[in-house]
Image: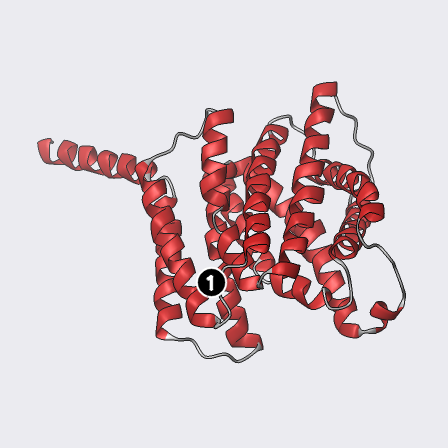
Amino acid sequence: MENKHTNGHIFAFITILIWGTTFISTKILLIDFTPIEILFYRFVMGFVALLIVYPYRMKVLDKKHEILFVAAGFCGITLYYLLENIALTYTFASNVGVISSLAPFFIAIIAFVILKEEPLKMNFFFGFVVAMTGVFLISFSTTSNFQINPLGDILTVIATIVWAIYSVITRKISNLGYNTFQATRKMFFYGLLFMIPCLFIFEFNPTLEPFTKPVNIFNLLFLGLGASALCFVTWNSAVKILGPTKTSIYIYMVPVITVVTSMIVLHERLTWLAAIGIVLTLSGLVLSEDRGFLRKRFSKTNKKSEHIQNY
């Protein structure tokens, strides 16, 4: 059981490690692609990759289960990423990164109201405040462009709430016993299905010219195969093991990963403000975790010590 719990944390960390750089990739692609084009190409690649890796057909046992997959595809694939991509055309990637860090708060509330299995504790709220303080310090220290952009920022808040709903739906699906690859592929299928009307509503004018640039090919492959096919499987696996609230806490690490990546790739200097922000963010992540098991172990250790002394 302990190994399974550790795997859940590893899956969540790998996912966030990749997702922490997707804002930058999307921002680069928005130069030559529209939001809906990026979204469509990304998840078509993701769907095909999952089909190749696990080509077995999935049989849904109940019509109610099918509704959950439809809802997950609509919320987690179509609506969330469409809102996020559109938001990036109105606001800075740093703004989107900061606001997206609110996701654990929304997920905790929705999970508590709907699932009734993850009670909200004081350590979560305290960790949330500490982590968000760190997130804002990182953002203010790494960009001079951070400012309020009403439309883009509001769209990001709505997207974050939609992601919270998706996370809770995913938790319900994970309890049904379906294979994670098949379940994720089914979500992608419905997500792509809901995208089709959006192709006509928004600017979808596919041309070959953007694909002639290596930077675009690289970023599309990164988003399609890494951030979509791989990460949705690892994220859904983490949610299945840890639950939506504990898994979402890793979202606090997104701005930390962005700073570290900038240092490695862009050779940016780490400021004292960013360093303090990283420490606070990681501290908030630890504080938000349910540490009840530590108290239990400490209590057991004390009892064992008392027993030895009495003996």
Q: Locate residue 168 relative to residue 51 in the image: left or right.
A: left
Q: Work out which residue is located at the far right of the displayed protein and give it.
A: 208
**As drawn, is 247 to the left or to the right of 202?**
left
Image position of 302 (left or right of 209):
left
Residue at 74% x, 25% y is 66
Residue 171 in percent (x, y) is at 57, 32
The quadrant the C terminus occupies is top left
Residue 90 screen position, x and y as percent: 62, 59
Return the x and y of residue 223 as percentages of the image width and height. 70, 58
Question: Which amino acid, by three-letter code, is at mark 1?
Answer: Val
How many marks do you count on the picture? 1
Task: Indicate whether 295 appears above or below 127.
Answer: above
Residue that appears at 80% across and 55% down: 41
Q: Residue at x 69, y 51 (%)?
A: 228
Image quarter of residue 211: bottom right
Along the line of sight, which residue is nearer the eye, 85 or 15?
85
Tell me, what colour scheme is on the image? secondary structure
Residue 205 sits in quarter: bottom right
* Name of the residue lying farthest toward the left: 310
Residue that carries the numbered disc 1 in the rendered image: 256
State whether residue 146 is above or below residue 96.
Answer: below
Closer-to-camera residue (31/213): 31
Q: Residues within 10 Å of mark 1 (few under 14, many from 20)?
A: many
Image coordinates of residue 32 in percent, x first then y, are: 78, 67
Q: Name the residue: 65% across, 28% down.
A: 177
Where, by quadrant of the figure, is residue 186 drawn? Answer: top right
